[in-house]
Image (cartoon, grey):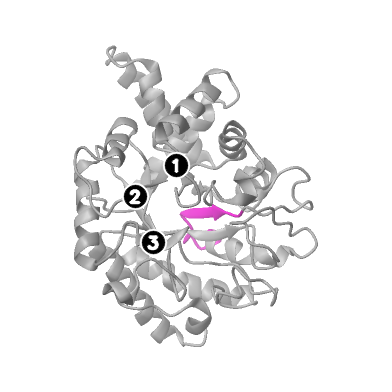
Amino acid sequence: MLFLKLATLFFTLMLFFQNAHASEMPQDELLKKMIGRMLIIGFDGQSVTKDSKIVKQIQKYELGGVILFDRHFNDRSKTKNISSPSQLKTLTSSLKSFALKPLLISVDQEGGKVARLKPAYGFEATPSAKVVSEMDAYMTKRVYDNLAKTLKDAGINCNFAPVVDLATNPQNRVIVGLKRSYSSEPKEVAKYAKIFMGALREKNIISVLKHFPGHGSSLGDSHNGFVDISKTWSEVELEPYIELIHSGDASMIMTAHVFNSNLDELYPSTLSYKVNTELLRDKLGYEGVIVSDDLQMGAIANHYTLEQIVTLTINSGVDILLFGNQLATQDSDELVETILAQVKNGSIPLSRILESNSRVEQLFTKIKTK
């Protein structure tokens, strides 16, 4: 924690001197860019130009990243961002060329049913976690080396994987039912996740552990609405995180939109200070980036206003807010202005913005983004 505090102090001083020598830049404009670094945004389109809306927002707010999908969630017949290897490479190259700062270009490429780069579009297939769990370490390494190469060739530098949820509930539809979990045994989950993360790291791709503090015991799907795991969740679901944090493998962790009254009697995990700061950071010792799951999912969007969502999420300890623009449409201008207003009225401490920016910039030092 000492290193993070020193890094945050350095980052704060750097911003102070930057602002002091750039009197033409209003404080609000600087704050907006700092807020922008805390956002990953989804958008429509298989190609971009300098006049594309997403490009203008990337440049105006220095967005932290974008997330790409192959199909529209509500209309699977419509292509969103990904149609072929050559098209995707052109898109990611264009996004990087227009960005004024390093940009996370992210996808969900777990393997199996959760894959945005599909064989139907010309990409190599990757088996599900359940299938991989039946392989030995050598074959697992080959599978994930091939996946990492596919992502690298496509220009992807952040993969929302691996899933480290335990397959503890056979009735679970969103994790176990889709074969996204390696095992019900924490050590097995950590073993396969570590191989996956190592393969990504060798290609300078950030991996993202998900979904903290565990989604494998749930009965519902947080895409659709409120999910309560209070009676099904167990502390054993934390063990893969403990292993991967202590081994130094974890640099980015995604929150789950699940409610657990044993951890927080008021808020689901994404919005919970008790879960993200007191448990994940203070108790488990995690110092890396926390990214929210998509904040447009029903479990969050159906129960809170936008002001409440961004304020609670940031104050809980989350560093990057994900708005996939799959389940709804959220304008980046409104997002930034809403967060800015909450900072200026004191609802969100400036220290949280500085702290998150420091973590995000440290994250970019781990990959070659250009």
In front: 191, or 182?
182
Assign a secondary structure to mark 3: strand
- Residue under numbered circle 1: 359
Q: CA distance from mark 3 to mark 1?
A: 31 Å
Left or right, 55 with reference to 180: left
Label 1 packing within 10 angstroms: few (<14), some (14-19), many (20+): many
Q: Which mark is residue 71?
A: 3
Name the residue nearer the viewer: 327 or 262: 327
Q: Check the image and report above or below for 27 versus 306.
A: above
In the image: residue 222, left or right of residue 333: right
Where residue 105 appears, as percent x and y from the top left, is: 33, 52
The residues tagged by marks 2 and 1 sit, at their Cα atoms, a distance apart of: 28 Å
The residue lying furthest to the top in this view is 23
Looking at the rendered structure, the secondary structure element under dot 2 is loop
Label 2 vs 1, first from the N-terminus: 2
The residues colored magenta run: 245-256
